[in-house]
Image: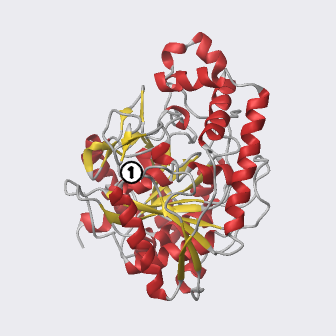
Amino acid sequence: MNKEEICFESASSMREKLIAEELTSEELTELFIERIQKLNPKINAYCTFTFDLAREAAKEADNLIHEGNQDLPLLCGIPISIKDLMEIEGYRTTFGSKLYEDYVSNTDEIAVKRLKEAGAVILGKTNTPAFGHIAVSHNLVFETTKNPWNLEKTSGGSSGGAGASVAAGLGPLALGSDGGGSIRIPSSFCGIFGLKPTFGRVPRNLHGTIGWATLDHYGPLTRYVEDAALMLEALWGPHPSDRFILPSPKTDLYHPLMEGELPKLKIGLSLDLGFVKAIDPEVEEGVSEAAKEFENMNWTVDPVKIKIRKPELAFNTIVTAGFAYDLQKEYKKQKEKIDDTLQKMIEAGLTYSALDVKRAEAKREEINTKIEQQFKKYDLLISPSTAVPAFDLGIMYPPKIAGKGVSPVAWMSYTYPLNMTGHPAASIPCGWTKERLPIGMQIIGKRFDELTVLQAAKAFQNLKPWQAEKPEWA
């Protein structure tokens, strides 16, 4: 097996090789470091390298394995990347903003600490827009992340660096966050798997911010569904510092996924979630055809009508009011260090009243009720992940979809409602456009039921594997 093939293997397979001592973590880590140094300049997925930390962790992992330890950490010796919204002790964390351009963390994010405890080898930080405020990945500190499948297209965001790194074979695992689609959008655009767990599954450090406090989910971006289960298993569980965290104990996800019997599922398919007015025809056809694959397993797939009405204003109100609260002082004193798009969001947020915010919260409850109604009849819901494939670099959103003028967030209409409700949702590659850009299918589960989402995703992966596809230049 050559170096490239190893870098595109599953983390689960890497783990087996490490335990069997067919490969050392130090060797594996050096392969990825060499690859990152060579290829990252083309896509700008990583913004900060932690190679010294990685080499130290790899050496520790090899020692544990060589000593014959039978209780090895879950991710022992496996390389991973961390989104630059999350702190790693002793390394720069900019949050994608010039306001924190020189900030060096003196602590580990809770999730980062758990990954370290699980034996993961952290290669570096991945690029993100300032404070994750938009769904494409560029900022004033590290500039733009490009899509590995077409270097003139966006990788999506705000976990765009994470998505691009996995798609380009610059690491098998990536930790991202998702406040409005920020795991699922880059997963869809970059042709990988990404899972937003139930809200409260993975503890977060909010850094005193309000903007994403009730919307943000931490989760995995991977090439293989089973790797996401392995990684999530290492991440989730209660922690006293996050008041939103669920009290559920750590449970085994990986073995039930790989060895458990598949249930016979009933799936509801929605191509509009009741409010989406425009979708790219190739995306619509790709998801429709992909959903039929489940019928080959004798699962039921029914079209459903979900009557969600105009969620966009509510989502924008909650997010922009949060940013206005978080950054109003910096906006007044250091405006030049704030991205133009974030300035506009702050300005919009400053116009909202307390009544406006509460009206948005009421809409949020209404959306949750509409989604929950579907789960009285269906085990899962399926929709497109995004209304379009990856669009051109340098723009915030496509001004038209299928020839129709649309709002700035119309292209991401399938993702953000699920942040408002907190349901688990994943994006899985399901096809390609004529321009050879990935199409993502979203799998939505009942609250607390990540396992069924993973089982359906793994079943689809078995039917329609995509991992043999690689960007030509990579």
Q: For this rendering, which residue is in front, 298 or 84?
A: 298
Label 1: which residue?
388
Specify few, some or many for label 1: CA neighbours under 10 Å numbering under 14, 14-19, or 20 or more.
many
- SS of the residue under disc 1: loop
**Does residue 266 appear in this view?**
yes
In the picture, the quarter occupied by the N terminus is: bottom left
* Quarter of the figure with residue 192: bottom left
Query: Which residue, as the protein is rendered here, is positioned at the far left?
Result: 472
- In the drawing, does residue 324 fall left or right of residue 387? right
Left or right placement of residue 394 versus residue 278 in this view: left
Residue 332 vs residue 73, the one in the foreground? 332
Instruction: Name the foreground residue: 279 vs 455.
Output: 279
Answer with the quarter of the image where residue 190 lies. Answer: bottom left
Q: Residue at x 56, y 79 (%)?
A: 257
Between residue 285 and residue 47, name the one nearer to us.
285
Q: Residue at x 60, y 52 (%)?
A: 218
| Amino acid type, callout 1 | Val
Q: Position of residue 355 (x, y in %)?
A: 79, 30
Q: Percent x, y for residue 430?
A: 38, 67
Whole-percent x and y of residue 433? 28, 59
Tally of numbered discs: 1
Residue 182: where, in percent of width, then height? 51, 47
Check the image and tell me how it is coloured: secondary structure
Residue reaching furthest top?
Answer: 333
Q: Is residue 210 above or below residue 124?
A: above
Looking at the rendering, which quadrant does residue 223 occupy?
Answer: bottom left
